[in-house]
Image (cartoon, grey):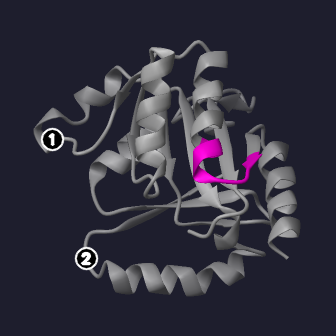
């Protein structure tokens, strides 16, 4: 079931000009992220809300590749200006919706939204075990999120790069957020 959902998610995410990387483990997720950064010529990135074990592997991988990696905790007094430097933002996702290729990002502090929304490239990390088939199936995980965070929480749905058709009705990517979007889907480990 999860393999089929991961394939459906990948097809939908790529249909909106995102790039999907299916990887088996957190360690291979870190390798894929470093490869994405290197291939894009990115020399600085910021990370937030990553799953346990991935942050450490990413720090080591970026260090070996010569990529500067900003990581939490972020000082509120430095935001949002501190997010002007990173060329990529890497964030963990709470769950995904397969039919639309959507990742759900949970933020209980502003830094997570800034890491995913301000850099030119966004890389979201989602576990295949958290994928739900349709948007209507997202109700249960959403209820659990709002029970866990009864105050000050934002859930953002991310489906590919930022897009707008406001300018002469021509679809333009990257105007209100990242121009490039990657989803790293961890297929064999549980969230």
Left or right? Give the position of 2 relative to 174: right
State which quadrant residue 52 falls in.
Answer: bottom left
Count of picture labels:
2
- The numbered dot on residue 186 is none
Question: Where residue 161 sits: x, y (%)?
Answer: 65, 38
Element marked by disc 1: loop
Element marked by disc 2: loop
Any magenta on residue 49?
A: no
State which quadrant residue 67 falls in.
Answer: top left
Q: Is residue 13 above or below residue 170?
A: below
- The numbered dot on residue 151 is 2
Give the CA distance from mark 2 to mark 1: 20 Å
Quarter of the image where the N terminus is located? bottom right
Question: Where residue 24 sits: x, y (%)?
Answer: 72, 53
Residue count near mark 1 (Cα–Cα under 10 Å), binned few <14, some 14–19, many ≥20: few
- Residue 110 visible to an observer of this rendering: yes
Q: Is residue 64 above or below residue 128?
A: above
Question: Where residue 87 sits: x, y (%)?
Answer: 47, 22
Question: Where residue 187 sits: x, y (%)?
Answer: 73, 60
Q: Which residue is mark 1?
A: 75
Residue sitting at x 65%, y 43%: 28
């Amino acid at each position: 079931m999860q393999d089929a959902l991961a394939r459906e998610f990948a097809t939908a995410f790529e249909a909106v000009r995102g790039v999907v990387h299916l990887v088996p483990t957190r360690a291979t997720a870190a390798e894929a992220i470093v490869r994405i950064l290197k291939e894009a010529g990115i020399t600085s990135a910021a990370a937030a809300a990553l799953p346990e074990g991935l942050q450490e592997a990413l720090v080591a991988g970026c260090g070996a590749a010569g990529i500067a990696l900003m990581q939490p905790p972020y000082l509120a007094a430095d935001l949002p200006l501190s997010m002007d430097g990173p060329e990529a933002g890497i964030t963990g996702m709470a769950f995904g919706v397969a039919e639309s290729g959507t990742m759900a990002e949970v933020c209980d502090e502003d830094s997570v939204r800034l890491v995913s929304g301000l850099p030119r490239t966004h890389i979201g990390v989602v576990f295949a075990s958290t994928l739900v088939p349709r948007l209507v199936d997202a109700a249960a995980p959403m209820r659990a999120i709002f029970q866990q965070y009864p105050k000050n929480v934002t859930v953002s749905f991310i489906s590919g790069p930022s897009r707008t058709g406001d300018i002469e009705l021509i679809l333009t990517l990257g105007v209100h957020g990242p121009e490039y979007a990657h989803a790293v889907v961890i297929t064999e480990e549980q969230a």
